[in-house]
Image: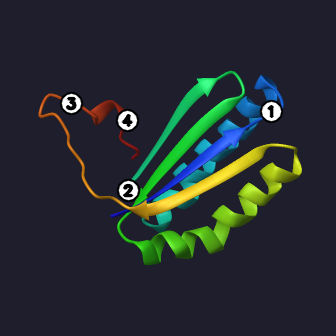
Amino acid sequence: MYVRIVKLSFMNDFSKEAASNLLVQIGKTKGFAEGMLLRMSVDVSDTQRYSMTVWPNKKLEEKTWKLFGEEILKKLRDTGARVEVSKGEINEINISKDLDLSSFLIE
């Protein structure tokens, strides 16, 4: 599996929320349709968010990056947001047997 981690730093909390809402919709409509396995976001401050997407492999991640990811992040940069992207193979995943993800499933 392959992961893309995006660190987004916005000018203010309003622009962060607006962009975050857009990214959620794009993930639901385009990301999962193109094979994305998981999307997770973490707000680390009022103006900063990390977004992580998991893909079956590097080839599929690169395809979606070219289809829509790169363009969307360019538009975010144009608004003044700072965008940092990291990518790589997943080395290890540990999941507790007690973790219930059913409330997060996209149908």
Q: Which comes sooner in the sequence, label 3 or label 2?
A: 2
Q: For the residue labelled by badge 3, is the local secondary structure a helix, a strand or a loop?
A: loop
Residue 37, compared with residue 94, is above or below; it is below
Q: Which mark is residue 94?
A: none
Three-letter code for the amino acid on which mark 3 is drawn: Leu
Q: Which comes sooner in the sequence, label 4 or label 3?
A: 3
Q: For the residue labelled by badge 4, is the local secondary structure a helix, a strand or a loop?
A: helix
Residue 19 position in % (x across, y down): 73, 40
Name the residue: 37% across, 71% down.
Answer: 57
Q: For the residue labelled by badge 2, is the local secondary structure a helix, a strand or a loop?
A: loop
Q: Residue tagged by mark 4?
A: 104
Q: Which comes sooner in the sequence, label 2 or label 4?
A: 2
Three-letter code for the amino acid on which mark 1 is drawn: Ser
Q: Determine contact: label 3, label 1, CB under 8 Å.
A: no
Q: Residue tagged by mark 3?
A: 99
Name the image quarter holding the N terminus. Answer: bottom left
Q: Residue tagged by mark 1?
A: 15
Q: Residues within 10 Å of mark 3 (few under 14, many from 20)?
A: few
Residue 72 position in % (x across, y down): 73, 58
Closest to the observer: 60 or 5? Answer: 5
Q: Which comes sooner in the sequence, label 3 or label 1?
A: 1
Name the residue: 87% across, 44% down.
Answer: 80
Name the residue: 71% across, 30% down.
Answer: 17
Q: Which mark is residue 37?
A: 2
Three-letter code for the amino acid on which mark 4 is drawn: Phe
Residue 11 position in % (x across, y down): 83, 32
Image quadrant assignment for residue 59: bottom left
Q: How many discs appear?
A: 4
Three-letter code for the amino acid on which mark 2 is drawn: Leu
